[in-house]
Image (spheres, rainbow, N blue to C red):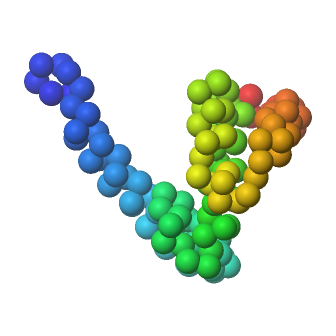
């Protein structure tokens, strides 16, 4: 917050970008240290920027979509669902509206299987 009490969104955006980059870097380094498969390390490294993932781009797109679906399962909301439907990962993976609807319809089964966490 600035001195006036207003939120300084410029600084928040810069800080968010730094955190995103550090998160990806730390994820990549941890994956290497733990000797995880290179494709898993690529998913950690390129999660925020899958366009640079080379041969692992599809695996990263799957990871991104899975993360967004999990978030929707926990939070819900039509805006988040609509954002997922129009996400470039959906198009990149060649998923159609029917396939996405199937994912959305399975929300309750997913949440029932992780009832412990609710």
Check the image and report above or below for 99 versus 28. Answer: above
| Whole-percent x, y for residue 66 in the image | 70, 50
Question: Horizontally, is 114 left or right of 84 in the view?
Answer: right
Among the 4 quarters of the image, the one containing residue 93: bottom right
Q: Nearer the viewer, residue 29 or 93?
A: 93
| Whole-percent x, y for residue 101 in the image | 81, 37
| Whole-percent x, y for residue 88 in the image | 59, 52
Question: Horizontally, is 5 left or right of 14 in the view?
Answer: left
Q: How many marks?
A: 0
Check the image and report above or below for 78 versus 58. Answer: above
Q: Nearer the viewer, residue 92 or 23?
A: 92
Question: Horizontally, is 43 left or right of 95 in the view?
Answer: left
Residue at the location (62% across, 74% down)? 56
Check the image and report above or below for 98 versus 53. Answer: above
Among the 4 quarters of the image, the one containing residue 37: bottom right
| Whole-percent x, y for residue 18 in the image | 32, 54
The quadrant of the picture occupied by the C terminus is: top right
Residue at the location (77% across, 48% down)? 96
Residue at the location (22% across, 39% down)? 10
Check the image and report above or below for 12 versus 22. Answer: above
């Amino acid at each position: 917050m600035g001195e006036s009490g207003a939120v300084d969104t410029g600084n928040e955006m810069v800080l968010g970008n730094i955190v995103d980059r550090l998160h990806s870097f730390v994820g990549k380094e941890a994956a290497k240290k733990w000797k995880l498969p290179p494709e898993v390390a690529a998913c950690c490294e390129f999660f925020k920027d899958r366009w640079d993932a080379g041969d692992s781009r599809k695996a990263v797109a799957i990871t991104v979509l899975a993360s967004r679906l999990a978030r929707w399962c926990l939070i819900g909301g039509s805006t988040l669902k609509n954002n997922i439907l129009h996400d470039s990962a959906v198009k990149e993976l060649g998923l159609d509206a029917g396939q996405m609807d199937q994912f959305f319809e399975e929300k309750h089964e997913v949440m029932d299987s992780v009832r412990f966490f609710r």
